[in-house]
Amino acid sequence: MDSWYNLFPRNPWLSVYIWVIFCVLPFFFIFRTSEPVSIAIGIIMVFLFFLCYRFSFKSKSGLVYMWVSLEMAITVGLTLLFGYVYLALFTAFFIGNIRRPAGFFIMYGVHIAVTIGAIVAGFFLEIELFLPQVHFLILTLIGVVLLPFNLFNRNKQEKLEGQLEFAQERISELTLVAERQRIARDLHDTLGQKLSLIGLKSDLAGKLIGRDPERAAQEVRDIRQTASIALNEVRELVSTMRAVRLPEELERVRQVLRAAEIEVGVTGTPVYETITPIGENVLSMCLKEAVTNVVKHSFAKRCGITFHPAGDSYAISVIDDGIGFLEGRAALPGNGLEGMRERLEFVNGALRITPAPGGGTELTFSVPSVLKHIVKE
């Protein structure tokens, strides 16, 4: 909140040009008087006001209320001496950005009372100066009353939206952790006992090969039967997990790219008839992560997605015309590439990142089709 452009408040009510006019206009009121001393006092008061206004944005403690009070005092002085009350809108804008409800309502009430008091006193002291601008004074009072409430409610809404977004992210993270724990628990319960049994029987079979070949053969048959049961249980466990299909994921990434105003082109078909569910799952997650990288990091105008024909592997390429992250620097942290590599390594897949021919980045990831035969066996 302490950037230089806060001198001109960003608000949907008034554009920056109107705020500039409010900054320049007091000099017109000041120079209407012919007395050099009054002109000098007026200029000093204007610069002091904006100095206090600047300090009020930079203050992080209770001093902010002191600076706002000085702004009010200077505004009263400019109103009574020169008939210029419109700097009260700057103070109203800042009061709307006070986050503490008690501080906001106190300064809000004081500011309204001080502004109304200054205008009323000005009418009594020099009615000829205030009467011609009565319409603008009424509009200023309306702004002083409504502008802080508008900003206060908007900031409160943004804070609540931020908290809601954070809560949703935490829920997603906790859901993911819970799902991982459930999968780990199911795998442990499903495979732990049987793998221990297979290990024990393997040791026993190894000891019996020389002494009792028949019993060793029986132990080997038991090992094979136990392994078959464990494999069936794993298949049942995997089948209960919702598989992510490539056509569905393609439609979702299309929507993401269009929302980011990135032109998208698709080559090939996302349907691989012979691909295994786990392979399609991995490709779908990698496609989602690749498109997310394009949206977040590439600053691209166009993104192309190519589904290569099935051969020794099922491959997908994502090409963008962005800045590229391989030019003179390593991959950005947190861009999901490590997660993609881990998923692909799990199924003996591959990830390749190269500069695109026309600039940008080409990312190709693939899953071997031989995985189907391994799973069948």
Image (cartoon, rainbow, N blue to C red):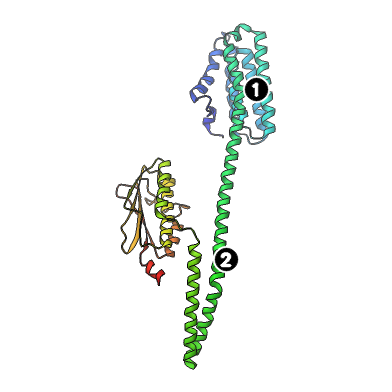
Q: Nearer the viewer, residue 4 or 117?
A: 117
Residue 244, given in percent of the width and then of the height, sits at 44, 56
Q: Nearer the viewer, residue 361 or 370?
A: 370
For the residues labelled 2 and 1, the Cα–Cα distance comes to 65 Å
Q: What residue is rendered at 60% in x and 13% in y?
A: 83
Label 2's element?
helix
Q: Residue at x 68, y 31 (%)?
A: 103
The residue most toward the top is 128
Quadrant of the image containing the C terminus? bottom left
Q: Residue at x 54, y 30 (%)?
A: 6
Q: Which residue is mark 1?
A: 72
- In this picture, is 212 found above or below 131? below
Residue nearest the observer in this picture, 5 or 235: 235
Q: Are marks 2 and 1 in contact (CB under 8 Å)?
A: no
Nearer the N terminus, badge 2 or badge 1? 1
10 Å neighbourhood of mark 1: few (<14), some, or many (≥20)? Answer: many
The image shows a total of numbered marks equal to 2
**Quarter of the figure with residue 375:** bottom left
* Residue 154, percent from left and from top: 58, 33
Name the foreground residue: 240 vs 340.
240
Q: Amino acid at mark 2?
A: Arg
Determine the residue located farthest toward the bottom in the rendered image: 211
Does residue 194 lie above or below 178 as drawn? below
**Rendered-image quadrant of the N terminus:** top right
- Residue at the disc numbered 2: 185
- Whether residue 210 sits left or right of residue 177 in the image: it is left
**Residue 225 in view, yes or no:** yes
